Amino acid sequence: MEIWKSVVGFEGVYSVSDCGRVRSEYRVSIRSNGWPCTTEQKILSTCSDSKGYPQIRLYVPAGNKKSAKQKLVHRLVAEAFIRPLEKGEQVDHINGIRNDTRLENLQIVSGSMEHWHTSTWPRIAMDKVLLPAINANIITKELAERIIAAAFKE
């Protein structure tokens, strides 16, 4: 069953699912002329950015105007279901497929670990040992990076 959570920073306006879909929430707002405006709940379409990652444009009211924010769908899913991202962290697609934004395919990694994941170091070490230990707060990202650097010196 698909689970929905509010998009961080857009609570009550947009939700994201563990399947990687984004929807607008039902709401009634007041227009600048004083008349009510009803927004129905609906699944929103995405488009891909230049690197192939699905993105979506979310609108937030800003006074009498609406401002649009482009957001990457995989980041919305990770922030809603895993945790907010810290500076320097990225969301990694475990299977390497950029448009697979399902929660089960996402994990939060440091920027440098994302580079190792997609290039040189063995996937088994990261997937089965280091990243689960980092996500469970058993070891720090810094310690994991030192372990990787020492084990895979070129």
Image: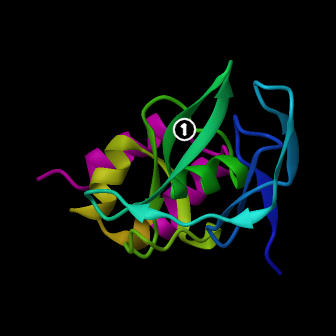
Which residue is label 1 attached to?
140
- Whether 130 is among the magenta residues is yes
- What's drawn in magenta, residue-wise? 127-154
Left or right: 117 as drawn, with respect to 3: left
Please identify the quarter of the rendering in which residue 110 is found.
top left
Q: Residue at x 71, y 50 (%)?
A: 80
Q: Which residue extends farthest left?
A: 154
Q: Indicate the position of residue 78 as horizontal and vertical percent values.
A: 61, 53
Q: Residue at x 31, y 69 (%)?
A: 122
Q: Is residue 56 above or below residue 145?
A: below
Q: Is residue 31 above or below residue 148?
A: above
Q: Residue at x 50, y 56 (%)?
A: 130
Left or right: 17 as drawn, with respect to 3: left
**Label 1 is placed on what type of residue?**
Thr
Quick one: 32 or 8, which is closer to the camera?
32
Quick one: 10 or 38, which is closer to the camera?
38
Instruction: Examine the residues drawn in magenta and state their main secondary structure.
Output: helix
Q: Indicate the position of residue 16 as horizontal and vertical percent values.
A: 70, 58
Q: Which residue extends farthest bottom?
A: 1
Q: Indicate the position of residue 129 as horizontal and vertical percent values.
A: 52, 63
Q: Indicate the position of residue 112 as horizontal and vertical percent values.
A: 32, 43
SS type, badge 1 = loop
